[in-house]
């Protein structure tokens, strides 16, 4: 009898300590969030540059008939688009692949986060589109060691703030505008032109899936360097679109059989029409 009582006491004591540690962990995380929000753990970046990236835009040369002859830029070949410039299947591909519950959460996907913690990330990540957009604000910063954990907390805070100040459509558009697709394809408009020689609105479903697939890693899944890997990744995106009822199973099977067709059209100051004219314009002091 005494042994049973001792076992019961030990079990109860273990339960008490478990909940104490659990509650302590929750309080510690909440404290870190408060410290990050107050700026104690370092200054929070200004996320308004996501909406107005005026320092990172390319300058376009427009002919008298309204056609774009070319462009020049310093660091980023970026020409922002609005939500109305994007085809619906491009948005569908993004949501199906990067954030299935994009329209249901407020910046942080609780279900995805708990799943990632339970499976230690083996079942996929938990970052929402809003969190991935927030991460772009830390591009080029040192995120080694404990700094990465502090940055992650800041990303969560910024993601929630983004959701309170912008619509879902605006957040998706900002993400498309800020992402670097490689080969000076900064943003979705440059990517559409460079890889397919099209405007974003003209992209078909498989082309949209190809570009969305590059969000996983634009260096690894780049059509110029790794066409087979890009084809495989495109097909994964198409599978996700079918899973989320954006396309039918028949459409998915048909599109997955198509070869990868890229029309690589680099945009530089030294290629295209009227290159001498561009160089003359660039040389004129402003």
Image (cartoon, rainbow, N blue to C red):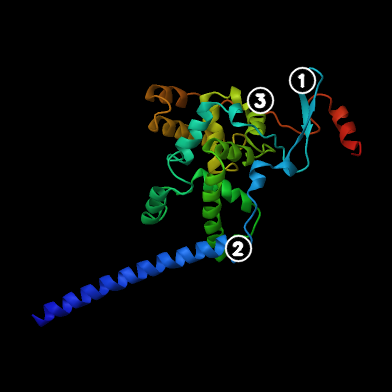
Q: Which residue is painted at 77% across and 28% down in the image? A: 70
Q: How many neighbours does mark 1 have within 10 angstroms: few (below 14), some (14-19), or many (20 or more)? A: few
Secondary-structure class at tag 3: loop
Task: In the rendered structure, find residue 197 and report the number of the disc placed on it.
Answer: 3
Q: Which residue is painted at 73% across and 32% down in the image? A: 267
Secondary-structure class at tag 2: loop
Say which label, 1 or 2, has the lower sequence index: 2
Which residue has dot 1 on it? 66
Which residue has dot 2 on it? 39
* Cα–Cα span, label 1 and label 3: 18 Å
Say which label, 2 or 3, has the lower sequence index: 2
Q: Which residue is painted at 46% across and 64% down in the image? A: 29
In which quadrant is the C terminus drawn? top right
* The furthest residue to the top: 65
Residue 196 position within the rendered picture, expressed as x and y whole percent measured from the top left:
63, 26
Q: Which residue is painted at 57% across and 46% down in the image? A: 133
């Amino acid at each position: 009898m005494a042994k049973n009582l001792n076992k019961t006491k030990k079990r109860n004591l273990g339960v008490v300590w478990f909940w104490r540690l659990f509650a302590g962990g929750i309080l510690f995380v909440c404290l870190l969030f408060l410290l990050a929000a107050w700026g104690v753990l370092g200054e929070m970046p200004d996320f308004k540059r996501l909406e107005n990236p005026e320092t990172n835009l390319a300058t376009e040369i427009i002919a008298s008939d309204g056609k774009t002859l070319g462009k020049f830029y310093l660091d980023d070949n970026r020409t922002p688009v609005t939500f109305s410039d994007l085809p619906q299947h491009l948005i569908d591909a993004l949501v199906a692949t990067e954030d299935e519950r994009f329209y249901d959460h407020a910046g942080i996907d609780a279900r995805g986060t708990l799943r990632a913690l339970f499976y230690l990330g083996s079942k996929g990540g938990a970052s929402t589109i809003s969190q991935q957009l927030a991460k772009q604000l830390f591009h080029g910063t040192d995120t080694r060691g404990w700094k990465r954990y502090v940055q992650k907390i800041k990303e969560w805070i910024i993601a929630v703030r983004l959701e309170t100040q912008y619509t879902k459509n605006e957040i998706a558009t900002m993400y498309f505008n800020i992402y670097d697709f490689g080969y000076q394809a900064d943003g979705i408009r440059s990517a559409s032109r460079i890889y397919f020689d099209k405007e974003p609105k003209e992209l078909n479903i498989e082309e949209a899936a190809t570009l969305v697939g590059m969000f996983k890693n634009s260096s690894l899944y780049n059509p110029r360097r790794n066409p087979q890997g890009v084809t495989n990744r495109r097909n994964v995106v198409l599978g996700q679109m079918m899973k989320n009822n954006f396309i039918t199973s028949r459409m998915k099977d048909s599109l997955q059989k198509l070869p990868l067709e890229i029309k690589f059209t680099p945009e530089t100051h030294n290629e295209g029409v009227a290159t001498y004219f561009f160089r003359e314009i660039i040389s004129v002091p402003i």
